[in-house]
Amino acid sequence: MPRPMPIDPKLGINAAVREATEAAERGRDVPEETSDQAGASSKKRRKRKPKEPEDTPPRPPMVRDAQSRDLALLPKAHLHLHFTGSLSVAALVALADADHERLPEELTDAQAFSAPATTKGWFRFQRLYNIARHFVRGEAAMRAVVANAASLDAADGSRRLELQIDPTNYANSVGGIINALEIVLDEATSSSQRTGVQVGVIVAASRLRHPIEARTLARLAARYAGTGPGSVVGFGLSNDEWAGDTPAWEGAFRIARNAGLPGVPHGGEMRGPDHVSTVLASLQPARLGHGIRASEDDRLLEMLVEQNVTFEVCPSSNVHLGVYPNLEAVPLRKLVSAGATVALGADDPLLFLSRLNDQYVIAREILGFNDEELAHLARSSIRASFASDEDKAGWLAEIDAWLE
């Protein structure tokens, strides 16, 4: 388990998370231990190190070919990242330490979560996510999450982050959903200025709650609608894809569209093409959270391409949630060859231990994309973002410069 981050009482949670983030950017989870500390704990760490299961795909190699450009310098947009799931392990440990609590080993053992693509598998995933979310309590912790996400995205070459949150999950600790959303939006503005990554927010309803609550969230999101940093830029629907009746959320998405907020519901990861068709007809998405299984129906895929619906593809997530047996099986190449707009995303790096830039490494090292094709993916992510046309033009020019 990573050594708990010390919390300076004068600086609080954000300082500890910032230290954890800086350490992660340098390639390790926490600051180096002194030799005495290392000697005292090394035996325990060796004993607890989990055995890598045979069916867990290895992380993509990070050593680049001499002829390959640095993917961390490739400008890109990050359009599929969940709030608590965006944390690094070190940052979560810092939050837990601030509460004088310890995390379960499953969240700190340096092994990515893995489960079969079943309801039971999803339950295991959601249980761990809920445990992690327990430690995101209060304004300081919520701000720390946004700051951590923006800082780590900056290290990955991201120019635009559209961070997804259901504010009802954090409302109790800050006095309600309005306060929860305003805290996140305010910190998104501050983090954008500090890191250079534009941070917009997607308000997402949950399939585990009544669709009427989604309408309340849609109206709240509409009050803060915009395209710039610190604005609500879209409206989503997340959680267990098997839960609820998808058409029941049509009203909430209509409210959001009328306020100028594009729809970005999840669909087409745990369920197949039939459900993607239902999402398309009922919720009229601008982007699909995942959508990857539309590749199983050529006519549906053609329709999505014709309607210019973007696929937010998260290769690591697809494998660790059991949708595909390994990274080679993720049909990213089929989507791109069909003319689909694809934006790579990390989904929940806290659990899958794979961030935005890792998805581009997967595309290069595992799926065989060359630099021109990787630049195409990066352009697609920027064009599919809800940023202003002026900002998009600037970032696209940076991608051209990366190829020179």
Image (tube, rainbow, N blue to C red):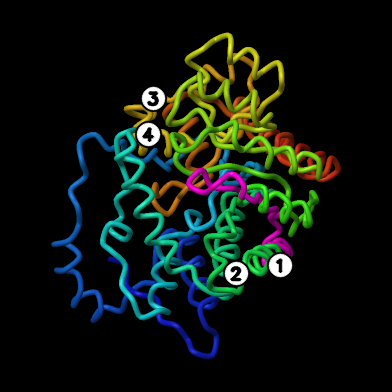
Residue pointed to by mark 2: 143
Mark carried by residue 328: 3
- Quadrant in the rendering for residue 79: top right
Q: CA distance from mark 4 to mark 1?
A: 34 Å
Rendered view: 351 above or below 168: above
Whichever of callouts 2 and 3 sits on the residue coming sooner in the sequence is: 2
Residue pointed to by mark 1: 186
Rendered view: 290 above or below 398: above
218 or 100: nearer the viewer: 218
Return the x and y of residue 68 as percentages of the image width and height: 54, 34
Rendered view: 252 above or below 326: below
Mark carried by residue 319: 4
What residue type is disc 2 on?
A: Arg
* Crowd rating for badge 4 (residues with CA inside 10 Å; few <14, some 14–19, many 20+): many
The local secondary structure at tag 2 comes to helix
265 or 379: nearer the viewer: 265
| Residue name at image x 40 percent, y 76 percent | 5
Whether label 1 touches label 2, CB < 8 Å: yes
The magenta stretch is: 187-212
Whether label 2 touches label 4, CB < 8 Å: no
Q: CA distance from mark 2 to mark 3?
A: 37 Å
Return the x and y of residue 80 as percentages of the image width and height: 57, 43
Whichever of callouts 2 and 4 sits on the residue coming sooner in the sequence is: 2
Whichever of callouts 4 and 3 sits on the residue coming sooner in the sequence is: 4
Q: CA distance from mark 1 to mark 2?
A: 9 Å
| Residue name at image x 52 percent, y 36 percent | 360
Whether label 4 touches label 1, CB < 8 Å: no
Q: Is residue 214 left or right of residue 222?
A: left
